Image: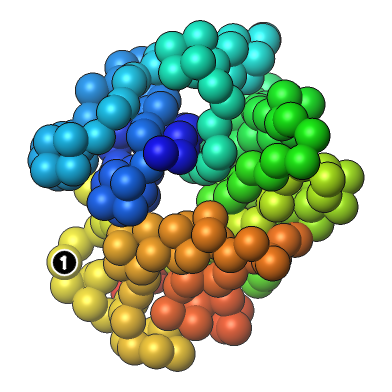
Amino acid sequence: MKLALVTGGVRRLGAHIAARLADAGYALALHGHSDAEPDVELTEALKRNDTQWHGFVADFSDDGAAADLLGAVGEKFGRIPDLLVNNASLFEYDDAGSLTGQSLEKHLKINMMVPTLLTTLLADQVREGEQASVINIVDQRVRNPNGDQLSYTLSKQALAESVRSLAFACAGKLRVNGVAPGLTLETEDYSDDQMQRLAINMPLNRLSAPDDIAVAVRYLAEADSVTGQILFVDGGAHMKSFDRDFMFMERR
């Protein structure tokens, strides 16, 4: 049985990814920022599959969090993960007029530095002749950015660029790939009507669904000849340029 570590894996998109991996027979190490209790749908998937799993709490703004998390997973399961899904991220608003060094540093640490450290620490523990897989969850905006959520965007651009570098640097031990979702799960910032109008703006006239992302993650986890790639799963959003973040578009 393979073991997957999913950061931010107990809520929202991370929970959908974890549920798909549970259905595929993975044991799961599920990370949460302040708690590690799976949401209702993920709990059902864990029970349905009789999944071996454990929750881990770690604040990625803390120094040493990456090493501590990977060490705790190894201690609990007695082995390193076969799959690391770097899904956890910080998403706070700023733009060129409000960006601060503190905001930029915090986004870079959580969204780029910790995933990179988890990746290199994992590579260091892979035994000779074996191979693990890493999948970074980035964002379709890395292809055509706008000025909103600037610290977040810069950190995701850095994470996206790290995919090729780490895929080459760790090629003997890891395959490293990325999945770039579009707008997938609405928040309180969106209305249902707005989401429908936004979907029509996409080349495929649809937004990405959580299971679309989860399917892409599973594909890359099992694609033994694929590394250094970013798979955009976004209804085609990356092929268009948008002046603002989606939350400011199609409001009525």
Instruction: Indicate the quadrant containing the C terminus: top left, top right, bottom left or bottom right.
Output: bottom left
At x 61% / y 57%, what residue is drawn?
178
Q: Which of 168 and 2 is in front in this view?
A: 2
**Location of mark 1 (residue):** 192
How far from the left and from the top, in percent, is residue 120?
Answer: 76, 31
At x 27% / y 56%, what residue is drawn?
186
Say if residue 72 shows up in the picture: no
The residue most toward the front is: 129
Q: In the rendered view, does 92 fall on the left or right side of 55?
A: right
The tally of labels here is: 1
How far from the left and from the top, in percent, is residue 106?
Answer: 64, 26
What colour scheme was applied to this rendering of the protein?
Answer: rainbow
Amino acid found under the numbered disc labelled 1: Asp
Q: Which of 196 and 252 is in front in this view?
A: 196
At x 79% / y 34%, what residue is drawn?
128
Which quarter of the picture shows residue 232? Answer: bottom right
At x 34% / y 88%, what residue is drawn?
205
SS class, disc 1 = helix
Instruction: Indicate the quadrant containing the N terminus: top left, top right, bottom left or bottom right.
Output: top left
How far from the left and from the top, in percent, is residue 90?
Answer: 51, 35
Say if residue 188 shows up in the picture: yes
Classify 10 Å Cα crowding around label 1: few (below 14), some (14-19), many (20 and above).
few
Up-down: is 76 above or below 188? above
Q: Which of 73 and 39 is in front in this view?
A: 73
Up-down: is 111 above or below 191? above
How far from the left and from the top, in percent, is residue 121?
Answer: 73, 25
Q: In the rendered view, does 153 fall on the left or right side of 8?
A: right
Q: In the rendered view, does 222 fall on the left or right side of 47?
A: right
Q: In the rendered view, does 107 fall on the left or right side of 214?
A: right
Which quarter of the picture shows residue 124? Answer: top right
